[in-house]
Each structure stands twice: as structure tokens, then as C-alpha cells.
Amino acid sequence: MNAKDWAAAVIKQDEIDKYLVGGKDFIDEGKIYEELEKQKNPDKQQVRDILQKSLDIKILTPAETALLLNVEDPELLQEMRETALQVKRKVYDNRIVFFAPLYLSNVCVNSCKYCGFRAENKEEKRHVLSMDEVRAETAAVIDEGHKRMIAVYGEHPLSGADYIADSISTIYSVKRTTPTGNGFNNIRRVNVNAAPMEIADLKKLWRVGIGTYQVFQETYNHERYAELHPANTVKGNYRWRLYALHRAMDAGIDDVAMGALFGLYDWKFEVMGLLYHALDLERQFGIGPHTVSFPRMQPAPGSFLSEHSPYLVSDEATRRLVTVLRLAIPYSGLIVTCREEAGLKRELIHLGCTQTDASSKLGIGAYSQKLKQEDNPDKVQFMLGDQHSLDEEVKLLAEDGMITSFCTAGYRCGRTGDKIMNLLEKGVEGKFCKLNAVLTFREYLNDYASPETRAVGEKLIEQELREIENTPFFTDKKLLPTFRSYYERIARGERDLYM
């Protein structure tokens, strides 16, 4: 089947209609504009009452979120930032989870005006990694010290569900001896950023052990979406994309991730769209998003719009939208990526982000070939702002008192979907994550850290160990003996022990 015929067969209308209410989707532009207008000039006490609700780890209403988006008072904005960090620490403690993106294909049937992968871009050199190339790329990522990966695919028959399933299995199969010879390292969780699929195809991914399934709506505004995504393409169907995560839930994938590409439309509207998306998932499945992303549009090879959109988002607006997202959907992880410049990325982490990437390469085949971004701009989707190595990032965050976590224990222990949501809301999951963060940090310091990073990391890990010993939760739940045993065994060379 050629790409055109394949694209025509992708969308299953009944797998859209089943989620609609009265034939309508959950994005009502008029209602969003009305809320944003109605909640202007917020009262200080109103804002503080909403901040308390966020601290109770309860998702906010559209009216409450619109009110926070309208705050202009410097004193209140500072209170919001401080509360956002409190929320993050209550749910996720002081850890930051690292992952590496792996781009497996840049062939695409779509024509998104802002993307370097779009079909009409003749400057892009196209390639789909073979399974041997996937193994080589994965090995290079593992050798940096990573244990999590997000695999990224274009929308095309050459990189459809069967290819994705095969590549997930291939990534999981790669094991590498650590530089110190202490056992092996491998990718323990493969998350996927891929096009919307039908339920039958999503079940294929579930069967091979997909982690989180991530689909970004790009923009939640119907009209703007239509302008950017030609109607004769798969991606031109707004609702097929809007309900991609609903279908994933029905396929058994209970960890889903959403996002918007900030810079395509008004940033306040997009925050409201993300909230409505989370609320509809809760309404239909009882589970909100595992993570929320807020990538800002960056220059993309061959795309005029990527640098000249009328909606480009300033650094200050980015700080505000991240703060509001942390407060509005307090149980979800927030992902900031290397799209951002290093300084701003670090700031956003301290506003409540929980995951980020490092040592990232966006070129197809760039890890194993050790290519820098400037070596292959014709094979990337957009340009990175931060090209720090994982070791450099670990050291910087350790200096800030933040522990790097490579933990994947919750997923392998079954703490996913509604189970993890309940634990996150109660602040319990963060406790287990703290123990596992220390165990995986010990692994990293032993196996991959430079002498400079190890020196900073040893001080931090001693501080973390003292805190764990003095936390009643760990004593009351009788977790300390097992934790101490695992820590000592890892220090002696064992790997992949978790609580």
C-alpha cells in the first residue's frame, strides 16, 4: 500500500464518535474565551484559596485556572511560584527524572507548516532506522548512563504500529556492560511519541511493554489547527488527534502524556485546552495525564512559520504558564526539554518540572555516529537550545540540591494508571520514588559519573540518606531495613534493585 492509500485508511470515525458528547468534543472556544475574560482582575484572597486547593493536590476548575492565568500582581505571582514548587515537592520530592529522546524515523505523510519533517520539505534527508541501527543508537544512549528513553516516530506506513512495536522490543533487548564492569545497564522504560492510532494498533504497543504514550495536540484551537494542518492529511483531522489518548486508555495503556506546541496560538488558551483535556480523561476514565509537556516552537529547517509565528511565547510567559500548569494539574509530571536554553530550563525545573532530557541528539542515527546538532541539521525536526551532557546536568542539579532519578520501579511494580494517581495525590508515591531515586543515583555515581560529578553527588546522597533515616513514614512502614540492604548491595556492584 502506498503512503497516500495508507493515510486514507488510518482514521476510524467510530473511534472518534464514541467519545463525543452530543456530537461535540470537549474544546469549546467560546467557553474558554469567556472564562479568561470573566476572571480578569482577580482578588488576592481568591488566588490564595486556589493555591491552597493546589496544595491539596486537587485538579483545578477552568474558572480557577483562568483566574491564575490572569494574575499580574508581582506579589501574587511570586506566591504562585513558591506554591508551585511546594506542590512539586509534596508530590515528587526534590528529584528530577532524566530520559533521552531517540528519533527513529523522519518520513512523514503530513504537511504541518511548522515542522521540519513535513512531507514537502525537500531539505530534509529521510531515513528509517533498521533494527541494527536501533540497537546501535540504544547502545550509545545507554553508555551515557540513561535508563529511560522516549522513542519518536514520524507518521508513515514505514514507521507504523508494527515497526514501532518491533523497535520497542529491540530497545529493551540491548544490554551494555557498565564502564566499571559492575553488571550491565539497559533501557528500563520506553515511552513513545507517535502519531494517533486505532485501538487495535495501540494494543500491539501495549503487548510489547510500551511505557507512556505521548501525543501532543499542537494547538487546541479548531480554526488555528485547520490553518496549520492541511485537510487532506491524516493530521488534518483535529478530533482523531484529540482523542488519541482516550483510545490508548481503551487499549490498556494507562499512562498517557499530553502537550501543546506553544507558539502556534495564544498561550493562555493552550493552557486552558490542556486542562480541559485532563478533565475529560478524568471524566471518562478516572485518570488524568501522567505527564504534561509545554514545548515552545523552535526554528525548524525549511519552516518560515517556526520563526515568524505571531504567537511566539516569551521567556516570562513561559515561566508563568509552567507555574499555572503545575498548580492546575498538580498530580501530573511536567516535562521541560532541551528545546530550551540551559539557563531557562534550569529555572523551569525549579518552578516545578519533574522530567527533562540530556545528551540529546535529534538527528536520525546521531547517537551512534556521535554527530553534533550542527553536523546534521538536514535530519532534525527542530534545533536544540541546550546541548549539555547527562553528566553535566546531573552535576548542576546536584549543586542545587536536586537528586537525579533513573527510577522505573513504579511501572514495573504495577504502580501505574489509577493506582499511581491515587498515590501521587496522597503524597505516598513520592516517598517510594525518593528511595528508588537514591538507589539509581548510587548506580549512576558508581558507573558513569565524572570525578567532579561524583564529588558533588556523594555530598548530596549523604544528605538524602540522613533525611530518609529521619522520616517517620519509612520507619512506620518498615521500609528502612530493605532499603539499607539494597543500597549496600548496589554499592558493592549489584544493579536494578528497587522498592
Image (tube, helix red, strand yellow):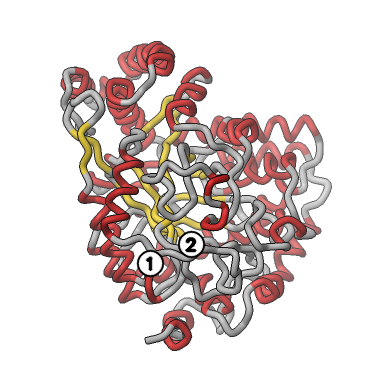
* Numbered disc in front, either 1 or 2: 2
- Residue 64 in sight from this viewpoint: yes
Going by the numbered disc 2, the residue's amino acid type is Val
Secondary structure of the residue carrying numbered label 1: helix
Is 93 left, or right, of 428 in this rendering? Answer: right
Instruction: Answer above or below: position of 431 versus 205.
Output: above
Q: Residues within 10 Å of mark 1 (few under 14, many from 20)?
A: many
Going by the numbered disc 1, the residue's amino acid type is Ala
Picture coordinates of residue 31, whole percent (x, y):
71, 68
Viewer-nearest residue: 79 or 209: 209
Quadrant of res 6: bottom left
Secondary structure of the residue carrying numbered label 2: loop
Picture coordinates of residue 357, whole percent (x, y):
47, 40
Viewer-nearest residue: 440 or 254: 440
Disc 1 versus disc 2: distance between alpha carbons? 10 Å
Kindly check if marks 1 and 2 are in contact, taking CB atoms under 8 A apart as contact: yes
Residue of label 2: 215
Q: For the C terminus, which image quadrant?
A: top left
Instruction: Answer above or below: position of 241 versus 328.
Output: below
Is 263 left, or right, of 24 in this rendering? Answer: right
Picture coordinates of residue 399, whole percent (x, y):
51, 17
Residue shown at 47% from the left, 44% from the top: 371
Residue of label 1: 248
Q: For the N terminus, which image quadrant?
A: bottom left
Q: Residues within 10 Å of mark 2 (few under 14, many from 20)?
A: many
Residue shown at 25% from the left, 48% from the top: 414
Quadrant of res 38: bottom right
